[in-house]
Each structure stands twice: as structure tokens, then as C-alpha cells.
Amino acid sequence: MPAKSSTIVTGLTAAALVVIGLLGYQASAAASGPLAPVRGDAKAAAHQPAADDQHDKKDKPPAPAPVPEQSGTGKRVVYALGAKRVWLVGADGTAQRTFTVAPSAVSPTPGTYPVTSRSVSVTGSDGVAIEHVVRFAAVNGVVIGFSAAVDGSTPAATGPNAKKTGGIRESREDGAALWDFALRGVQVVVVP
């Protein structure tokens, strides 16, 4: 019996060490750079390089694309067909968020449309499970709206044989932001 209990203890100890090692590895992999000095540690702070010193100016991300001119005023969603980009613009005219989208096979004509309906989750006309659907227009019987594919996919390539769908796809994160912003009646301004 004593040999069995020591084997069990040895096995449990080995398993615990493996788990601790794995957690330590995950924590080190998740760290995004040197830790900031503890508050009040001025000496350590003096030896930390400034954030601007650590990266060249060319490493900084580009400034967000400006809201297109002639896109209206007030709270609105702006969709630029050519840029394949959406802006969520607050009442003060400032872009709260901007992101790229995968355009639909059928595009709305430039103009201003109200959000007409919304669905938390449905199956898209291309058979893909989608969420955060915000509809605002229709072209020849094809309903146009923003959505995010649950599996993260984008629409199939467009072309003469492509299915005529109106889903403008965005990432799930961007879809959630647009869902929260574009309540029924909010204006969607489509620009070239």
C-alpha cells in the first residue's frame, strides 16, 4: 500500500508541475511588452524608454480614414461603395468607428436611407448563418443590409454567375458595434 500512495503523490505532483508550467508559458506569451514600473517607482520609470522612442513613426498605424464629405450631418452610418468602408458617425459629426466591409453582389444606389428592420440572427440568402443584421434598402427585390457571418466568412466572389445577394459583410466585432449604433430609423448614407 505505501508504494501505491507514493506513486499517486508523485503523479499528482508531476501533473501539478505540468499545469503550473503551462500556465506560466501562457502568461508569458500573453504579455505584450515590458511591464510598467510600480506606481511611485520614479527610478525605474526614468530608465524606461518613452513609447515614442520604442517605435519609429512609420510603425504607427495610419490615421483613420476621414468621414466622406457630402455625407450629411448628425448621427448616421456612412457607407462608401468605392472604399468598401463604413463609418459610424455621432450626432456631433465625429466618426466613432470606421471599418472595411465586403460589399454585396447587389449594391444600393448613393442616397440616404433609414434603417428599416433588424434581426439578431438569421440565415443569409447565401445560406450562411449571420448575425446583427441591419437592413436599410432594396434593389429590384433584393434586400440590402449589413451583417456578420457567424463563421467569419465573407461573401463568395462576385461575377456573372454569382448569387444576387444584398448582404454587406463585416467582422463580428464591427457587426456588434453597428448593431448597437444603428437602431431603427437611423440614417444610412450611401456615397460612391
Image: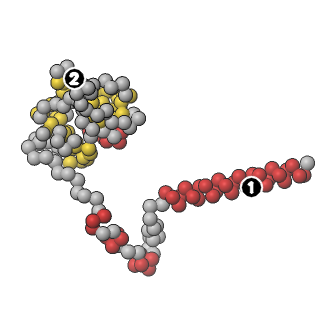
97 over 187 or under it: above or below: below
Considering the numbered disc 1 on the image, is that residue within a helix, a strand or a loop?
helix
Q: How is the image coloured?
A: secondary structure
x and y percentages locating residue 61 in the rendered image: 28, 59
The quadrant of the image that shows the C terminus is: top left
Q: Amino acid at mark 1?
A: Thr
Q: Quadrant of residue 178?
A: top left
Q: Amino acid at mark 2?
A: Val
Considering the numbered disc 2 on the image, is that residue within a helix, a strand or a loop?
strand
Q: Residue at x 26, y 26 (%)?
A: 161
**Residue 130 in view in this figure:** yes
- The residue carrying mark 1 is 13
173 over 25 or under it: above or below: above
x and y percentages locating residue 10 in the rendered image: 79, 55
x and y percentages locating residue 30 in the rendered image: 49, 57
- The residue carrying mark 2 is 142
Residue at the farthest top position:
141
